[in-house]
Each structure stands twice: as C-alpha cells, then as structure tokens.
C-alpha cells in the first residue's frame, strides 16, 4: 500500500548539465609550479574565477614535497577543485584531502570531436551564428566549431569555441578558442578590448594586448605556444 502523503509529493525531475572545466596538471617541484601559477594569476586575476577545476596528478609520483598541502594552497588562491585524477584514491598523501570531489573516468574535451584538419574533404565545418549582443554574465559554449557574433560581446561575458571566434563588433569579454584541441584556431574582433584571450589552453591577459591594437580591428593566433595579437588587415 502506498502512503497517501507520498502520492501528494511532486514528481522529482533530474536533468544533466555540462560545464567547461579547466584542468591543472602540477609538476615537481611543486614550489616552482605554484610560483608559476601565481605569476599567471597575477597576469589575469579573473582567469580561474567561477571556473570548476580538475586537478590531474598523473605527472606526480605521490611523494613530492608539498603535495599534502597542495589542495589548501590552491584553495587559498580561490581555485575551485571539483575532482582529482591521476593518483590512486588510496594514496596516503591524499588522506587529508576532501573525499567528496574525488572522481575518475573523465574524458578530455579534445577527444570528443576530431580536429578540423582530419575531417574529410568537403566536410561541413559547424558554426554557431549569434546576431544579438552578448551581455555581461552570459557564457557561450560551442565545442563543435566556430562561433560567429555579428554584434558585440560585453565585459564579463565569455565565449568558448571549439574552433575560431569571430566578433564583428567590440570584444570586451573573454574569448576562449580552440577548446577542442584546435591550435590553428583564431580570434577575430572588429574592436579588440578583450579581458582575456585564449587558444588551445594558452592565454593572454588584457594588459598584454599591444596598445597600438587595443580598440582596433585585430586577430589573435597561436605560434609556438605563444599568443600573438596582430592587425586584422595586413598593411603594406
């Protein structure tokens, strides 16, 4: 017999929702790695803000100096760890770490779709076209291909694309291209004022954009793992 009080309860709805998570892979010695992390945070204090982070420990043996304190070190830097991977959960060094976020079985995002270069000839490259302005606080996530925005991107907004990002107005938010492993992806803006630029995991903070190109038409590309900002049109 079913309890009448249970019959009056509303149905439980469970849905899935995917988010873009960043992956940090510490290297030994950890003191040097943290020093490098601090330098990057100094360059762009908002890069990790509000982003879930997966801590991949596969480059470590589990016996490094400072590993037991690493979680607290990252927490003190406002880095939100949602899971760890790469070391056995039974490792004694992790006994003092929170257990509720230890997950396994994650897949890299660049394994979801093949790189554009490997697609068959005449294969259509997907793109996502947006005509409305992207407001502050909005996040666009399109790992399948290019994102084309015929309007402007406000400060505080974020665009994530598996391929390139094209903004025909002002780009004032964060543009993260090549998230599906596309090192040849680019970022184009008719008015470059981005808070942060990133391609295939490498990024540049707003302060590093050349002054002569700030607020000007510009493109961003990756050369030898270094972000470069160049004029949108070549001048003679």
Image: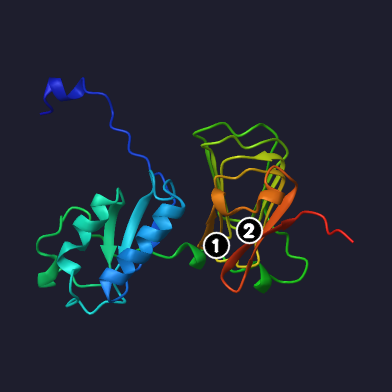
Determine the residue positioned at 18% across, 53% down: 100
Determine the residue positioned at 16% across, 62% down: 69
Closer to us: 48 or 41: 41
Q: For residue 130, which quarter of the picture?
A: top right
Q: Which mark is residue 201?
A: none
Instruction: Provide the secondary structure element on which disc 2 rests.
Output: loop
Crowdedness of circle 1 by 10 Å Cα count: few (<14), some, many (20+)?
many
Quadrant (top left, top right, bottom left, bottom right) of the N terminus: top left
Instruction: Provide the secondary structure element on which disc 1 rests.
Output: loop
Q: Does residue 183 lie above or below 40 as drawn?
A: below
Asked which colour scheme the image uses, the reply is rainbow
Determine the residue positioned at 71% across, 50% down: 212
Residue 29 placed where, x, y %? 27, 76
Q: For residue 37, which quarter of the picture?
A: bottom left
Q: Which is nearer the N-term, disc 1 or disc 2?
A: 2
Closer to us: 35 or 180: 35
Q: Alpha-carbon distance for marks 1 and 2?
A: 7 Å
Horizontal side of 54 relative to 8 (left or right) equals right
Closer to us: 58 or 48: 48
Closer to us: 123 or 6: 123
Crowdedness of circle 2 by 10 Å Cα count: few (<14), some, many (20+)?
many
Residue 111 placed where, x, y %? 49, 68
Horizontal side of 62 relative to 143 (left or right) equals left
Q: State if disc 2 and disc 1 touch (CB < 8 Å).
A: yes
**Which residue is under mark 1?**
180
Q: Residue furthest right?
A: 236
**Which residue is under mark 2?**
163
């Amino acid at each position: 017999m079913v309890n009448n009080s249970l019959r009056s309860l509303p149905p439980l709805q469970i849905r899935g929702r995917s988010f873009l998570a960043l992956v940090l892979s510490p290297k030994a010695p950890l003191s040097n790695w943290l020093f490098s992390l601090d330098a990057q945070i100094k360059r762009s204090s908002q890069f990790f803000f509000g982003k879930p982070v997966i801590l991949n420990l596969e480059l470590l043996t589990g016996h490094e100096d400072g590993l037991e304190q690493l979680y607290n070190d990252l927490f003190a830097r406002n880095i939100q760890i949602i899971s760890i991977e790469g070391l056995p959960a039974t490792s004694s060094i992790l006994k003092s770490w929170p257990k509720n976020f230890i997950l396994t079985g994650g897949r890299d995002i660049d394994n979801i779709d093949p790189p554009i270069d490997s697609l068959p000839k005449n294969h259509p490259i997907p793109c996502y076209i947006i005509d409305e302005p992207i407001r502050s606080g909005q996040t666009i996530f399109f790992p399948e291909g290019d994102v084309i925005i015929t309007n402007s991107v406000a400060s505080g907004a974020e665009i994530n694309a598996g391929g390139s990002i094209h903004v025909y107005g002002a780009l004032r938010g964060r543009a993260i291209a090549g998230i599906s492993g596309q090192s040849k992806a680019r970022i184009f803006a008719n008015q470059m004022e981005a808070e942060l630029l990133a391609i295939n995991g490498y990024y540049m903070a707003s302060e590093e954009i050349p002054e002569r190109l700030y607020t000007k038409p510009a493109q961003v590309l990756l050369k030898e793992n270094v972000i470069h900002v160049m004029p949108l049109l070549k001048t003679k």
